[in-house]
Image: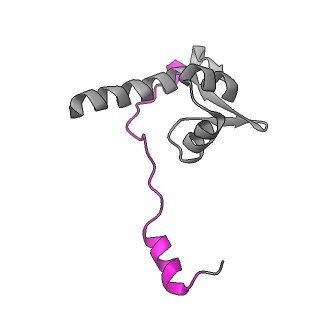
Amino acid sequence: MLLRKSDYEKEKKHPPKLQNTHVEFDSHLLENEVWLTTEEVMAHLNVSRSTMNRLRKQQNIPSIKLGHSPMYPKHLLNKIFIYKALGNINKR
């Protein structure tokens, strides 16, 4: 699909925004970090593979690629979801 010039300019003006930029990072946390595979995170969060892929691609959860496999830091995953849960409580 070809974009018209005006469509291209609109896309440039509104780049995707990063989410979860509020999570504080401490390098000492990673010294004893437990890294989980996609299957382990699926079981930990009780979500499907498609949900995991969507969360990772939208950068809603932290991950790195080790070879062809994404790996997830368990401590940061827990911290993000605790913040989200507390945010849901505060909105009520």
> 52 left or right of 76?
right
Name the residue rendered at 53%, 86% in the picture: 5
- Residue 53, percent from left and from top: 63, 41
- Residue 47, percent from left and from top: 57, 29
Place residue 37 in its image quadrant: top right
Relative to 39, say whether 59 is above or below.
below
Can residue 63 be seen in this snapshot?
A: yes
- Magenta span includes 34: no
Can residue 37 be seen in this snapshot?
A: no
Name the residue rendered at 43%, 45% in the picture: 19
Extreme residue in the right direction? 67
Extreme residue in the bottom direction? 5
Name the residue rendered at 79%, 36% in the picture: 67
Relative to 57, say whether 35 is above or below.
above
Total number of numbered discs in the rendering: 0
> 43 left or right of 11?
right
Name the residue rendered at 48%, 79% in the picture: 9
Give the camera-side residue of 22 and 42. Answer: 42
Extreme residue in the top direction? 32
Give the camera-side residue of 9 and 47. Answer: 47
- Residue 10, percent from left and from top: 45, 76
- Residue 28, percent from left and from top: 51, 19
Quarter that holds the N terminus: bottom right
Give the camera-side residue of 53 and 15. Answer: 53
Give the camera-side residue of 55 and 20. Answer: 55
Place residue 30 in its image quadrant: top right
Q: What span is in magenta?
A: 3-29
- Coloration mode: one colour
Quarter that holds the C terminus: top left
